[in-house]
Image (cartoon, rainbow, N blue to C red):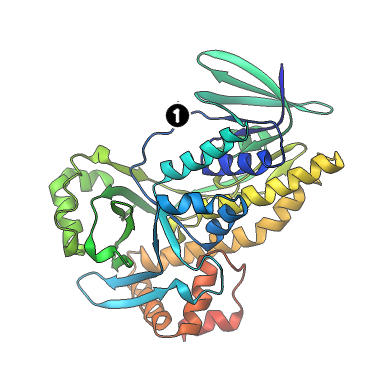
Amino acid sequence: MQSYDVVIVGGGIGGLALGCRLANDKRAVLILEARPGISPSHRGLTLQPNGLEALQKLALLERTLPTGSKIHTVAWYEINGGLLASLDYSLLDHPQNYLLTVVPSELEQVLRDEFSRKNGVVHESASFEGFKLCNDHVQVKSRRYGSTAECSTKILVGADGADSRVRTALHVKTQTRECPDHFLFMLVGPVDALRQEARQYLSLGKMAGFFPVPGGTYIFYYLPRGKLNGLKAEGLDSFKNELQKIMPELAGSINNLQSWDDMTYAAPKRIKVQSWVGDRVAIIGDAAHALDPSWAQGANMTLQDAISLGDTIEGSFQSDDFSSDRPKTYENARRKQTTFIQKQADRSARLTSTESRFNSWLGKRVLRKTGTNRRLMRIALNASCGLTDHFTIGEQLRFLL
């Protein structure tokens, strides 16, 4: 039976980032990845200051920057109306006071290359089957190419998403709720109007975002739950016309959308887990705290988790302590912020991607107020970028009054 210092289930951004962090300390790391390889994504991913800072700590920010489009401004518009707010990220007192929109598969490739360079091992087409806790190690069972395989490790980490099989095997109490806002994600051609900024458009029951990526544009389109089949029944051309009505400058840039298969549909879940750790086992990212995508914080928080858990695991090796008390320091360090962001993302979704007339009116009011007050803008951006873990009562009132 092959032995590793750490086995990570899930070779996405979080698992690879954790693998890179541990490989920096010369740990023997195995990643079990269910997919057969990295496939080109049909969507984009916005890295915010907290995620960019995590990449900086991995010494991978400079390698990531050329794969993305860097912007400082996100302009919010009312559909068929005017500008609601122009949010300026350069106001943030942070070294990475900007957004970087990348294609997820390209970021995965940067992380995979670094992980492999540091002798990390990836087993593709490998599904996690379960684990057994022994006196001084964890016995991990997986299935690959039709055969069962086993290995041992000092600690097992689940970075395997909202439907985490490691979390299920850990038998921890979990609350799962499907988010009311579903999305279509897609990549289309470049748009000149988006060279210096990103845009988001909203109205009652509608929201769409347009972010530049190298050589193209990343679009996300809000769909109320249960409306996908109706949208498809109206036809792809009707949907493309809808996008061009929302943003006329898009004309000519969406010709690459030839079928619904050129898009990714997401029905996100909100996950709340009683405990993220056990003896020699931990979970990170969406496995621990999946959230509404309205704040685009999922991957960014996962990157922060990877740094925090990586530091904690290294401390476990230094002290030879792998009991649940040791990795609990990682959970204690991360839980307050993730809970805060989960709650605020829920509130933001209720005010932006909403079919409630009152909530829609209130959401536009908050945006207008934020856009005209630099202090409020800085407070809002610090929160949405994962740079704080609370609002004071006074700050909350300023957004509404």
Q: Is residue 268 above or below residue 32?
A: below
Element under disc 1: loop
Q: Nearer the viewer, residue 287 or 41?
A: 41
- x and y percent of residue 244 in the render? 17, 59
Q: Residues within 10 Å of mark 1 (few under 14, many from 20)?
A: few
Picture residue at 56% right of the left edge, 19% below the top: 143
Picture residue at 62% right of the left edge, 54% below the top: 57
Q: Viewed as shown, does residue 337 lie left or right of 12?
A: right
- x and y percent of residue 129 in the render? 60, 24
The amino acid type of the residue labelled 1 equals Gly
Picture residue at 46% right of the left edge, 45% below the top: 107
Picture residue at 19% right of the left edge, 44% below the top: 256
Q: Which residue is mark 1?
A: 37
Report if residue 163 is visible in the image.
no
Quadrant holding the N terminus: top right
Q: Is residue 109 above or below residue 401?
A: above
Q: How many marks?
A: 1
Report if residue 383 is visible in the image.
yes
Q: Nearer the viewer, residue 110 or 270?
A: 110
Q: Is residue 159 above or below residue 125?
A: below
Q: For the view shown, which residue lies furthest in the top direction?
A: 147
- x and y percent of residue 322 in the render? 81, 39
Q: Nearer the viewer, residue 338 or 103?
A: 103
Q: Which quadrant of the structure image shows residue 51?
A: bottom right
- x and y percent of residue 80 in the render? 19, 71
Q: Viewed as shown, does residue 205 lie left or right of 381?
A: left
